[in-house]
Image: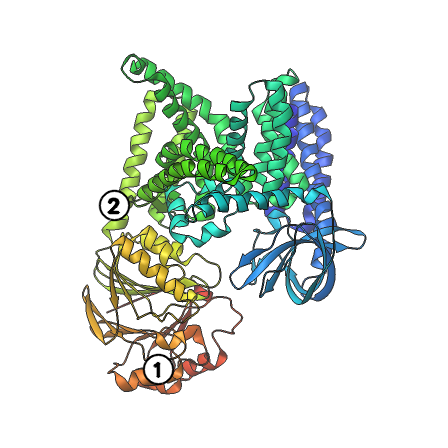
Amino acid sequence: MRRLARAALAFSAAIFAAHYMVPERWTLPCAVFFAAASVFGFAFRSEYRRLTVYLVCVGAAAGFTWYACYTAIFVSPAAAFVGSGARVTAYVADYPQQLGRGSRVTVSVRLRGRPDVKSYLYMYGEQPDVAPGDLVEFEAEFSSAGEIRGEATDVFTSKGYFLSATLSGGLKVLGSSRSPVYAPQKLSKFVRDMSDAVFPPELAPFMRALIMGDTAQLREDTALSAALSAAGISHIVAVSGMHISFLIGFLGLVIKNKRALAIFGIPTLFIFMAMIGFTPSVTRAGVMQCVLLLAPLLRRESDSITTLSAALMLLLIVNPYSCANVGLQLSFGAAAGIILFTGRIDESIENALRDKKIYARRIPRAAVKFVTASLATTAGALVFTTPLSAVYFGYISLVAPLTNLLTLWAVSVCFCGGMAACLLGFAFLPAGGVIAAVISLTVRYVFGITYSLARFPFATVYVSNIYVSFWLVYMYIAAIAFLMARGRLRQTVIPICLSVLTLCGALFVTYSYRGAPGFTTTALDIGQGQSLVFTSGEYTAVVDCGSSSGENAGGLAHEFLSAQGRPRIDMLILTHFHADHCNGVEDLMTRIDVETLIIPEPDGGDDESYLAEDIIELARRRGTVILYITRQQTYTFGDAAVTLYPPFGGDDENERGLAILFSDGDYDVLITGDMDSENERRLIRNYDIPDIETLIVGHHGSRYSTSVEFLNAVTPETAVISVGRNSYGHPTSDTLGRLAERGISVYRTDIIGNVTISGG
């Protein structure tokens, strides 16, 4: 490792330490300590050791110093706005993005005598007519971008956004800048719009995400998004280093001369990075690719480790807080794994195949080389990204290597062909449409492979399963031991087989418990929403699956079921079609088989009736039996029974919801959805509701539900409230008071997480 790499890695390590481990007040003292420690490097006689200690200490001192300075220059001024309202001027940095019933626009707030502060501006109503470079004036309530609903987060600060503003007054456009700084954003919008114009509507969101990293529309297709995650290739729509390689590879097909490729390719790379927004993963790959292009021209050999270290240091100089960016960590982890391990893996496979005389048989050498190179690259990239994925996303895709092998060649065709279709579309739209029609066949191939592999049993395993966590730790210990022993490729058979056997053992132990007798009720912690899991032996029922807090309710429900060894849902019951009860259903149904969907008759007049239509259509495509509840129905559920009570009707969706009673012997659990007090009274007047043991409190603890008359009639012993951070005041003091007066034990998901009660 060369000198620059040592200093760069020390600088970067100090930034990570300052962000994750060292309190802010100790940042500068740490810098002073390492600066003083650098003098001890001169105590070594060896020039190599002396220089190493000196560079590491100086690099670490610089890292701690820069983190403290950046915080003082950029973060502290932004903190002065938090919790207050102000009228400010700002430059619009990008086009507005539609978010449900409102929109969000990126702005740079102007501060007198200080650098501008990047912020997100949220507003309700119609999308504002603004464009990058517009100078706007507005009044807003400011909060820290380092918090979401009161919880600390690095999602926005790692991207350089330190303020979040909610528009409280009018927004006025004062003028527009003609600076070329905003040209890439405008070009990016042209490409996105052209992609929508030339590709079929069902493929356009995927192509927007693949080409420009705009996943807003793709996220609305929950089925495809879930399949991409389960199959382990969601990274293909997060524009990253892979796309940089595709772009340069495409240019290399056209430009054969290395000097011409560097002259034309480097500006193209910078324009592309600017269009994407200089995200950490793209910037890392772009910097490394530029060095790779320049190395032959400067008659120097490219040092991958030094280049990777320098790229990381450069990104952390621009924004030290980007060290917490998941994309940055995954990108650098993948690159480091490829640099350190891919060549060795490929060489070992090559030698083994040569020993077995594979090439002497009727298998084309090019085909074998393609497969082995793809496997080696995938394996190298997974070395460091697998534990990162386990930590950040909570799951590991076991089919990811196979999915990557089958689709990455097609993804490269889609990316390059999509860019060509958009460029041709600018010149002559029909020509772009012809190219897009051909590329669409490849896109559908990617979709087919993705959906197929995502449906494989055990396509993903979750580290919330303690046995899977132990397996992952064991696998890495075995790999490290093998490397330390300097074993040969043929000797990897034993640790690989042991890893496979231990994984099978972990899954066997998990799934062996699913048939255990007994009845359980679990309220999942999915934020402001509701998702309930009921089990009776091998039978599984899920009631509702939705969240308005931004959590992926479908993914969380699937994680819980997978960790419990439950590969299917016998009954998926929806009380009603509000988003906080069912916006995760499509995601869940994509990940796991659902035998029966039980729902009320949807009312096409409701604003959220599109959710019902999408869910019903997906259920039909999946072959799921759909039952509409229009009268009282009772079904067997393992050793228990479930009784469903039809809606009473009304103008509001809450009044058109089901009530559900699970009974296991003398143990009863009642769910009322979002029923109000009037419908609760109708329920106990019209049906013979028994005394119950557990009540899933209606409407997340709203004061308009869980009335005195209702509680006196059903007399619960335990109450469970599914709730998250919200602006409604749920659960209200009125509801909590009524429960406390009757000595009812209360359990809340926002306080204790998942709530599981065993009964029967």
Q: Which mark is residue 46?
A: none
Circle 1 crowding by C-alpha within 10 Å: few under 14, some 14–19, many from 20: many
Q: Nearer the viewer, residue 586 or 83?
A: 586
Q: Amino acid at mark 2?
A: Phe
Q: Amino acid at mark 1?
A: Glu
Asked if 129 appears above or below 41 in the picture, the reply is below
Q: Nearer the viewer, residue 449 or 95?
A: 95
Give the mark toward the camera: 1 or 2. 1
Image position, residue 594 (x, y; %):
27, 56
Q: Is residue 545 visible?
A: no
Q: Nearer the viewer, residue 392 or 652?
A: 652
Q: Is residue 24 visible?
A: yes
Q: Nearer the viewer, residue 757 or 580?
A: 580
Provide the residue designation for mark 1. 680
Q: CA distance from mark 1 to mark 2?
A: 44 Å
Q: Is residue 72 left or right of residue 706?
A: right
Q: Which mark is residue 508?
A: 2
| Residue at far right of view | 113
At mark 2, the secondary structure is: helix
Give me the residue at 44% from left, 75% from top: 701
Asked if 227 appears above or below 368 in the picture, the reply is below
Image position, residue 82 (x, y; %):
68, 62
Image position, residue 681 (x, y; %):
34, 85
